Image (cartoon, rainbow, N blue to C red):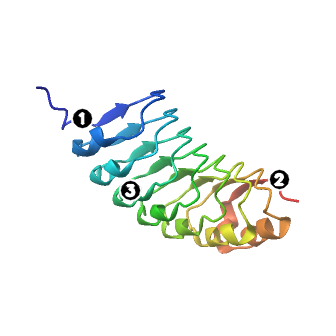
Amino acid sequence: MCTLTSLTSLNILECRALSTVDAVSSLHALRTLNISWCMALSDVSALRNCTALRTLNLRYCYQLSDVSAVSSCTALTTLNLRCCTELSDVSAVSSCTALKTLNLSCCPKLSDVSAVRNCTALRTLDLYGCNRMSNQGVLALSSLPALTRLNLRFCDELTAAGVEALRNTAASTSLHIESSAR
């Protein structure tokens, strides 16, 4: 039987019946994992063993609500959770201090991203369409020294006062904020 323990990149796209990624638990050399459009995926706990991951794409995994396993993926530089519509907690990303790009767009249950305050290398954060995102939920972003791009469009609970609070921080000197706040 063939083993794939040296595999560094894996794409699992549009496997609509896939509900777990247990098969990746032994792929310790995996650096890039793309599991997009797997609409039934709800269990990614096996990612705890994928500590070499640099890029993780879980976009359009509509049933995914728990990403706590990414706390073990401390080498992550890119994490895409776009349209994980059941996701309401991203506290696990606080362990991903090497993270440079984080896409949480269209995660309508998210209201707070204060956990990213530990991601001091974060340059790009996309919160487009996180319509429960509040002023308080984004205030922790003001402490991110590397953040240069922030998308807050269609964050319906965010007000102009919240956006201005971000603009008036030391980190905002080169920060480009897109917002539709009123």
Which residue is painted at 64% across and 58% down in the image? 110
Task: Name the residue carrying label 2.
Answer: 180
Spatial separation of the CA atoms under disc 1 and disc 2: 43 Å
Residue 24 screen position, x and y as percent: 29, 40
| Quarter of the picture holding the C terminus | bottom right
Q: Quadrant of residue 149?
A: bottom right
Residue 168 screen position, x and y as percent: 75, 72
Q: Secondary structure at mark 2?
A: loop
Type of residue at label 2? Ser
Residue 21 screen position, x and y as percent: 35, 40
Task: Name the residue carrying label 3.
Answer: 69
Which mark is first along the chain, 2 or 3?
Answer: 3
Question: Horizontally, is 134 left or right of 69 in the view?
Answer: right
Question: Horizontally, is 99 left or right of 145 in the view?
Answer: left
Q: Which mark is residue 7?
A: 1
The vertical placement of 11 against 136, above or below, is above
Q: Specify few, some or many for label 1: CA neighbours under 10 Å numbering under 14, 14-19, or 20 or more.
A: some
Which mark is first along the chain, 3 or 1?
Answer: 1
The vertical placement of 46 against 8, above or below, is below
Q: Secondary structure at mark 3?
A: helix
Residue 95 appears in view: yes
Type of residue at label 3? Ala
